[in-house]
């Protein structure tokens, strides 16, 4: 399973765009990149998933360069409620039961 | 739909006691997982299942057993609890092959277990 590296923590202010980068140098050909968000005392919640280039949904964008050795989660105009831990996972969805390693995540703190 | 539910929400055990954590999902998902999360750390996979009647070991399986007798339920057992098993336990499920290329795991609210 591919190992991922993320910053331990980041600070931002309300209304700013936040970019969290994840490094996954040994990503395999069939691996997808998935991001989860976790609030205190809750289970993680799926944010976005992608394979290459750019994926966008109603809450975030995911940018993946051509070599796929890193990825960037972009949160537009964050609010206080976006304060959470963000996890980057790399794995193949439909083999090995989609197993991936969560890592320790990035703690994002949004300030007023 | 209730999604993924976990029972109990909290539990305190003495060293050496046993207990079973129950996870139930009503989304007809094929895959189910048990994770543990220690303070300030990410989730670590304990065991998982790719279908009814099947189980497999994850990263940290020692001291735990699991069973998946019904597709909607995944049980995690601690035969002889130890203080090192004090943690928050999360159950999750995902569609598996039926979900095409989605890798979305749906998580339960967690069980906070303290072993004294």
Image: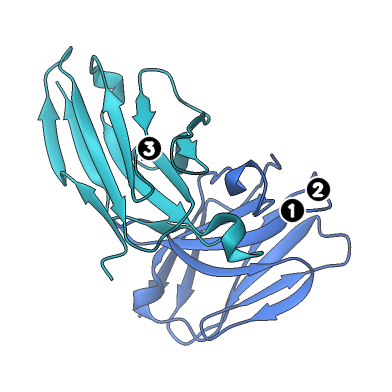
Instruction: Please count the marks in the image.
Output: 3
| Position of residue B90 measured from the top left corner of the image (x, y, whole percent) | 34, 46
Give the Cα separation between the discs numbered 3 and 1: 27 Å
Q: Few, some or many C-alpha atoms within 10 Å of disc 1 (few <14, some 14-19, many ≥20)?
A: many
Q: Few, some or many C-alpha atoms within 10 Å of disc 3 (few <14, some 14-19, many ≥20)?
A: many
Q: Which chain is blue?
A: A
**Left of B65 or right of it: where is A100?**
right
Q: Which chain is cyan?
A: B
Q: Along the line of sight, which residue is nearer the eye, B47 or A5?
A: B47
| Residue of label 1 | A31
**Left of B10 or right of it: where is B30?**
right
Proximity of marks 2 and 1: CB atoms separated by less than 8 Å: yes
The answer to whether residue A15 is above or below residue B88 is below
| Position of residue B76 measured from the top left corner of the image (x, y, whole percent) | 31, 33
Give the Cα separation between the discs numbered 2 and 1: 5 Å
Q: What is the number of the mark on residue B82?
A: none
Mark 1 element type: loop
Q: What is the number of the mark on residue A28?
A: 2
The answer to which image quadrant residue B53 occupies is top left
Q: Residue at x 24, y 37 (%)?
A: B21
Q: Few, some or many C-alpha atoms within 10 Å of disc 2 (few <14, some 14-19, many ≥20)?
A: some
User: Label 3 is found on which chain of the structure?
Assistant: B
| Residue of label 3 | B68
The answer to whether residue A33 is above or below residue B12 is below
The answer to which image quadrant residue A56 occupies is bottom right
Q: Residue at x 66, y 64 (%)?
A: B101
Mark 3 element type: loop
Q: Along the line of sight, which residue is nearer the eye, A41 or B56?
A: B56
Mark 2 element type: loop
């Amino acid at each position: 399973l591919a190992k991922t590296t993320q910053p331990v923590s980041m600070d931002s202010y309300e209304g700013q765009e936040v970019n969290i980068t994840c490094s996954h140098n040994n990503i395999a050909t069939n691996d997808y990149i998935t991001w989860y968000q976790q609030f205190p005392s809750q289970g993680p919640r799926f944010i976005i998933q992608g394979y290459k280039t750019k994926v966008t949904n109603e809450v975030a964008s995911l940018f993946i360069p051509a070599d796929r050795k890193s990825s960037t989660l972009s949160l537009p105009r964050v609010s206080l409620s976006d304060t959470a831990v963000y996890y980057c996972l790399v794995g193949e969805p439909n083999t090995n039961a989609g197993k991936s390693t969560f890592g320790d995540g990035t703690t994002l703190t949004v300030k007023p | 739909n209730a999604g993924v539910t976990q029972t109990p929400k909290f539990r305190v055990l003495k060293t050496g006691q046993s207990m079973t954590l129950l996870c139930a999902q009503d989304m007809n998902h094929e895959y189910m997982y048990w994770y543990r999360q220690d303070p300030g750390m990410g989730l670590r996979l304990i065991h998982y299942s790719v279908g009814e009647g099947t189980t497999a070991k994850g990263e940290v399986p020692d001291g735990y057993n699991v069973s998946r007798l019904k597709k909607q339920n995944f049980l995690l057992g601690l035969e002889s609890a130890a203080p090192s098993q004090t943690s928050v336990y999360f159950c999750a499920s995902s569609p598996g092959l039926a979900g095409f290329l989605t890798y979305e795991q749906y998580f339960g609210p967690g069980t906070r277990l303290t072993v004294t």
